[in-house]
Each structure stands twice: as structure tokens, then as C-alpha cells.
Image (tube, rainbow, N blue to C red):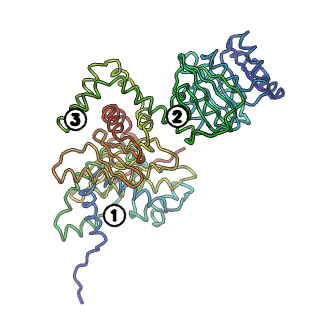
Amino acid sequence: MKNVLIVDDERSFLLSLVEGLGTYAADFNTLIAENGKKAVEVLKSTRIDLVVTDLKMPEMDGFELLAYLSKSYQDIPVIVMTAYCTAEIKSRLETMGSFHLLEKPLDFKDMVNNIFRELTSISRGYIRGITLPAFLQLVELERKTCTLKVKSKGKTGYLYFNGGELLDADNGFNKGEKAAYDIVCWDEAEIEISSICRKKTKNINASLSYIMLEGFRIKDEKDWDINNKSEIESILKTAVKDCDPLTSMDKVEQDEKNLNPEANKKEEEMAGLKEILNEFTKLQGVNAVCLVGRDGFLLDSIARTGIDTEMIGAIASSGFGASESMGRQLGKGAMSMSMVEFKNGPVMFSPVGEDAFLVIIADNDSNLGMVRLKLKKYSSELATATAVAI
Amino acid sequence: MNEGKILDIAHISFLDMIKIMITLSGAASAKGTLIRNSLKTAERIAEVNYASFQEYLSAIENATNPITMIEGKSSHQGDFVFGLKSCPFGPSIKNYIEVFEKLPDGFADFTTEFNKPSNITDQYRVGEGAGVSPFCSVHQPMRSAFAEKIRIGGKKIHIYQLGCKSGSGKKGFAEKWIKETGAPKDVVDKVLDNHMCCYYLKIFG
């Protein structure tokens, strides 16, 4: 029998839940704890399959409990009850494969569905437990004041929050944003939380979401550099030699595939168009990525809030078509990429298979080289995924 | 005083405009623009509910049905299959050919593009072989989109384009929609003997 532990400081609420969940006594046992401290005692004495916790509690609050779980019970799935839930945050956290959010006041039916989903996911081998990025988003969401001590693979770092705002970071080598970019990407992080923030001065101006986006971009680039250092040198040498970067990249890609069949296999196994598009949004300065049918109707997109992707599709179709027509009229052959530079940044178009094209909208500080590289890297997967999407 | 034959310049310009769109941004983009435009037009009409199918047919007869107001009277051939006697673009095409002898270049590519499977033609159940000219990419989605504003007995309706006939008499059949609706192809073929356009009306629920 599976055990579900519900943690909340409202006793009447707990008792009504126990009564309600009694209907499912044949499926799971319901255990209760009135705060994080009592939850830890239960966790130490009983095998728990799922924790459902509130965040605001006396003695040891939900954040401290989450931190404890991240350190000592990484495999236990968690559902967090919060009053600050939005659909966007909910979806973002769920995409991270971390905990699920339940909006307070609770919808009992929704809660039961989530419990069953989590308990079933155990046998499916879903990613679970608490990831650092998800934890950080919750700190921001709940406007928490705290200091986080993050440990990973022998490294220790500190993140200082005041009212959910990231004030400063320290990874032992750097402070401020530079340290934050590093810490937010640490794998298998153990989190310790203290509800005091001794830092009063703001040394980080960027938002937490930007720090995470940029941190992962830098990490991606570093990983890529490490794995492909010799290939990069080869690109540069060949590019200088024959001034044909795309041909050079073709060669390097081929070499990369030959050298690293595992990575190639992994690429092939990468499922879902959304995941591919997401690769582009991880790049610095990329605001939107839209996959558009040549008729201008949107097939899929990931965009920053406020960008009308349907409209982009319609307009870009004319722009893309015009570029292609120009190339054809001038006898320049098939188009590989078109870029229009505006005052506030470039817009790039790149064909995807026979029936679609990709639109990338970026800021002035975007790394166009990386965009081009990713376009080359994912062109075939995009074409395959697009054929399914159409 | 005999003023001679006067062409409707708006019609002539529209036909040439399609050619320019194809030249400037390609057939696919031009197709998308025309379909989007049709859908936008449909957004502007008011929703209407007919108490029964009979009342819907009467509205066609009285020319008060929104679809009838854009394409003229269609006739029910039985089993929810309809035939439209005249193509709404017929007079424009006739006028154009009288002056310029043939339709602009690029129209064939455009028609092929319209008949290719795509999300948008799937959504509105058009094309798939039922396109015989670029005008079908305006007319067919517009009719389907108008239908989304119509209820019969409070129930939603969908229109499926089954076939169409060009001015030269060449018939185009949408095998996909014929199969999906279960309308016999020989019936569609027969309807197109005496009509320019053939479609199916499905009432949900």
C-alpha cells in the first residue's frame, strides 16, 4: 500500500482531507503532519511515496521541508500547495519534471487527480524530486526572504533572497550575477535554507528567470566548447581558409557525428518539436521561435509574453516568400537563411523541409553564431518533426 | 448612347493581384494570405440559428442565409449534399478571359498548392483536390468559416468541400472529404455535371 503524507498547519483542514481521502483507502494511506518538523519525523519512521505540503507553516516551513527532501529523499515526488499559482508557473515547473503545484483554496477533485497521477508516475519512472531551478522559482513566487546554501559535487554556493528577489550570490570564486549564473545550473543540488537574509545590498539587477535562462545558455556553450573544442578550431581554420562557413559546418557536423555516435543517437532520440524549439530559446537574446507553414499559419512556437506569434506567422510568410522569390529571380538558388536587422534586433528566417520555415526573433545582444549553429544542428530533426506537425 | 462593354476593374485587379502575390512571395504565402483574408471576412458576420434544417433550406431559398449571400443559392441534392450552380468568381473570370484571353501565369501552381494537405485546409475541410483555381482558396474556406457562425436547432454545423468544376469543365474531387463524409463519389460526380461546386453539410449532435 502506498503512503501519502500531507503537511499543513491547519488542523481542521488536515482532518477534513483525511476524511475525504478515506474514500481512497483501498489505493493509499493518508498520513498527516502539522509542520515540516513533524513531517521529517514521519519520513524517518515510515516509507512515504508522496508528500503534499503547504509552504507557510510554523517551526519548519514548506521551503525547509523541500530543502530537506532535496537532500535526503530525492526520489519522493512532491505536490506543493500555494496561493500564488499561475498557469504559466505551473506549466514551467511541471516541464522541469519537478514538483506539481496545487492552487489554494484547493479543489478536492483536482487534488485527488494529482495524487493519483504522482503515485502512478512512480511506476512509470518519471523525473521527480526537487530541482534547484524549480525551488528557486517557488522562492520567487512566494516572495520568500531567505538564504540558500547550495551544495553540488564538492562545490558550495549561496543565494540571497529578499521578498523573493535575488539580491546576491556567492560561489566561492565570484559574487553577484556571475556567481548566480553558475550556481543556478548546478546538478544534483542539495539545498539548505535559512529564513534570514543578511545581505541588504542588491548586487544582482537581472530577474531570476533571466539569470536562469542566461546561466543555462552559458553552461550549454561551455559544455559545447568542451565537447567540441577541436571541431571549433577546425571550423575556424576552414572558414578562414575558404570563407565558406556553412560548408565548414557541414564537415564539422559530419565529423562530430562520426566522432560521437552516442551524442548523435541522443539527438535522434530527442522527441518533440517543442523541445527542439526550446533549444533556441535557451540562447542569449532569443525572444521567440516560431515554426510556420509556408502558407503563414503557425505550426508551433515558444515566445516571450506579449508576442503575437500568429501575426508573426502571417507577416513572416510574406517576408520569407519575398526573400525566396528574390533569390530565385536573381538566380541564387535555394535559400538557406534570411536575416533582417532592425533597430532593436534581428529577425531570422530559415527554411525547414519543403513546407515550413523557422522564424527567430532576437535582441541586439543575441549570439547569432550560436543561432546559426543550432539551425544547422537541428535542421533535420526539425524537418522530421515538422512533417508530422503538418 | 452605347458605352460598349465595361469591365469591373476591381475584379480584373484582384485577378492580377493574385499573380503579383505569387510572384512576390510564392504560391504558398499567397494561398495563406487569401485564406486568412476569407477567415477574417467570416469573423465579421453575425451568428445565426435556424430552428430546423428545413428552415436553413428556406433561408437559402430566400437568400437570407449568410452563405447564400456570398455565393448565391445552392440546392440540396439529398443526404446533405449541396450543389452550387454558378461559381461566384465565374463572371470575373469570364470578363478577364474576354479581354486577356487567358488567366494570369502562376495560377496552376497556386491551385496545386491549395490542394496540398495542410493544417488550415484540414481545419476548414477544403482543398485536398477540390481546388480547381486560386479562387477556390478564397471561396471554399470562406464558406466553411461562415458555417461556423451558423447553428441548426442550436447544433454546430461543418461544411466539407467535396468537389469543384473549373470553367473549362475539369472536375476536381476531394477524396479525403468524400471518404470522411461517406458521400458517394458518383453522386458528387453527378452533382458536378450540373453544378460548379459540391459540398456536404454535417450537423453535429
Q: Quadrant of residue B195?
A: bottom left
Furthest residue in direction right, as rendered: A12
Closer to us: A371 or A172? A172
> Same chain for the residues at labels 2 and 1, yes or no?
no
Q: Residues within 10 Å of mark 1 (few under 14, many from 20)?
A: some
> Same chain for the residues at labels 2 and 3, yes or no?
yes
Q: Is residue B43 above or below residue B190?
A: below
At mark 1, the secondary structure is loop
The chain containing the residue under callout 3 comes to A
Q: What x and y, as percent, mark residue A364?
A: 41, 48
Q: Kindly identify the amino acid type of the residue bearing the numbered disc 1.
A: Pro
Q: Quadrant of residue A234?
A: top left
Q: Mark 2–mark 1 contact, CB under 8 Å?
A: no
The chain containing the residue under callout 2 comes to A
State the separation of the CA atoms marked 2 and 1: 57 Å
Q: What x and y, as percent, mark residue A367?
A: 38, 40
Furthest residue in direction top, as rendered: A45
Q: Which residue is mark 3?
A: A239
At mark 2, the secondary structure is helix
Closer to us: A146 or A363? A146
Residue at the spot 39% in from the left edge and 64% down from the top edge: B72
Q: Is residue B57 above or below residue A260?
A: below
Residue A333 in view: yes
State the separation of the CA atoms marked 2 and 3: 33 Å
Tell me the tag on residue B88.
1
At mark 3, the secondary structure is helix
Tell me the tag on residue A212.
2
Q: What x and y, as percent, mark residue A238?
A: 20, 32
Left or right, A151 with respect to A25, comes to left
Q: Residues within 10 Å of mark 2 (few under 14, many from 20)?
A: many
Q: Quadrant of the N terminus of chain A?
A: top right
Q: Kindly identify the amino acid type of the residue bearing the numbered disc 2.
A: Met
